[in-house]
Amino acid sequence: MSVMKGSFVIALDQGTTSSRAVLVDQNGSICDIAQKEFTQYFPQPGWVEHDPEEIYNSQRWAFEEILRKNNLQESEIKAIGITNQRETTIVWERSTGKVISNAIVWQDRRTAKICDALTADGFGDYVRDNTGLVIDAYFSGTKIQWMLENVPGAREKANRGELLFGTVDTWLIWKLTEGRVHATDYSNASRTMLFNIRKLDWDETLLKAMNIPRSMLPEVRNSSGHFGELVHKSHTIPITGVAGDQQAALFGNACFKTGTSKNTYGTGCFMLMNTGDKVIQSKSGLVSTIAWGIENKVSYALEGSVFIAGAAIQWLRDGLHLIKSAGETFECAERSYQRNPENPVYVVPAFAGLGAPYWDMYARGAIFGLTRDTSSDDIARATLESMAYQTRDIAEAMVNDSGIDMQKLRVDGGACANNFLMAFQADILGVPVERPKVLESTALGAASLAGLAVGMWSMEDLSSHKEIERTFQPSLNKSQRNNLYHNWQRAVKRSMRWIEDSQ
């Protein structure tokens, strides 16, 4: 295709399973998308890795492809925004740019014992009070520590100032600017378990506890602002927006006011609520995080993270071979519903432990309620339904922490295109679910932050860009809803601390 000539922003949306380039015009409309999947590595049970060079090459390919497909000149691209899988950890040599190992992905559980040691040393309250997070293998800090302790020669190089750390945004900025910029934004920094979200600086106490040299860490900048230039042929294009994928989705959903919230259904499932200029300390297993920084003013958010959501659909396709494509789950669920409206099967997709509000690194996946007549359709349906149940887990915790009743849920991400899932989500929450016309809120958020920095849009313009495509109304009564959810909680309880119990 070929778009009309004019001014555009390209969002580089670097996800857990693919890299995409999303072309956004000056009206905030998505014109085209280029996408390339990359390899997932599972060297040991509970370990998940990516090749950082493959991440960059796939992202660069998507960028070049969007230019080629739309016959765009570099001068028409006014800015680039970057949004990324968070917490995934990359370490490379300062002088050569060569990585010291594969990236350790956010889903990876290998640092559970390091986390246990930090907890035993009494750092739990300190981490919660100063980073807003909980001690968990999910976050970047212990992944860096593991690399320095297990990659030959890494500790010595780090102590000599020869190594750099970055989450995926930092790695892409470094590569795209040809090594001129080593930086991240507030939202990504707040996911490392090393950044003090109150002082807005790297936390010396935690750096010492994990024996991580400060020289490895990137400069932290506003989410909407200058991050250097991508050099393309004879032109330079400014990189002016950076945010972790879930914060970008919050921004892309125009959740600018305190109390507004969204849920993203991607590889994982993530609900965020804007809490304005206040850090709300969770008592219900959520984390406090930085939503974004604009003009040196930081906004905070409450977040609940489900580690496995869309990844469970990939498991149905690639692991169990029950489906050939994600779209088939809708038909599977419909057939299962026609056969038995009250599905007795529950899938707990704790393949990488359980995130909020349980935070159990030792939980593992399980299927409950199997009988002789259970079909593959029932298992596919239960896998879909697990996303909705996990979302209710987080929603209840968010209401408890914030004191704000949920009136509706705004959704985005690939899986929210599934009408069965969205209808069930409304049923199990008991509130309407709003699905926007444009589901690419993460990419739109990155593009919006970038365009905001170069004057393409104002905050008022960005608010006007959101349109609702469909609202799903709940149909179950309270008794039905609570009975289904009670059985989900029973299933979760039986999957918890599985590894520890078996040793």
Image: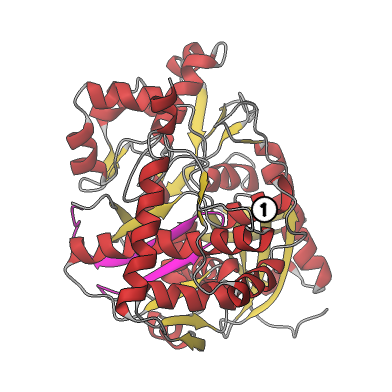
Q: Quadrant of the N terminus?
A: bottom right
Residue at the location (35% across, 45% down)? 493
Residue 365 position within the rendered picture, expressed as x and y whole percent measured from the top left? 51, 43
Q: Which residue is mark 1?
A: 316
- Which residues fall within the magenta stretch? 258-282
Q: Which amino acid type corresponds to the residue marked 1 in the rendered image?
A: Leu
Whether residue 191 is in magenta: the answer is no
Quadrant where the image shows the C terminus: top left
Q: Residues within 10 Å of mark 1 (few under 14, many from 20)?
A: many
The location of residue 170, given as percent across then percent down, is 52, 44
Q: At numbered mark 1, what does the secondary structure look like: helix, strand or loop?
A: helix
Q: Is residue 270 part of the magenta span, yes or no?
A: yes
Q: Is residue 464 left or right of residue 131?
A: right
Name the residue: 54% across, 72% down: 421
Q: How is the image coloured?
A: secondary structure
The picture places residue 20, in percent across and down from the top left corner, at 67, 60
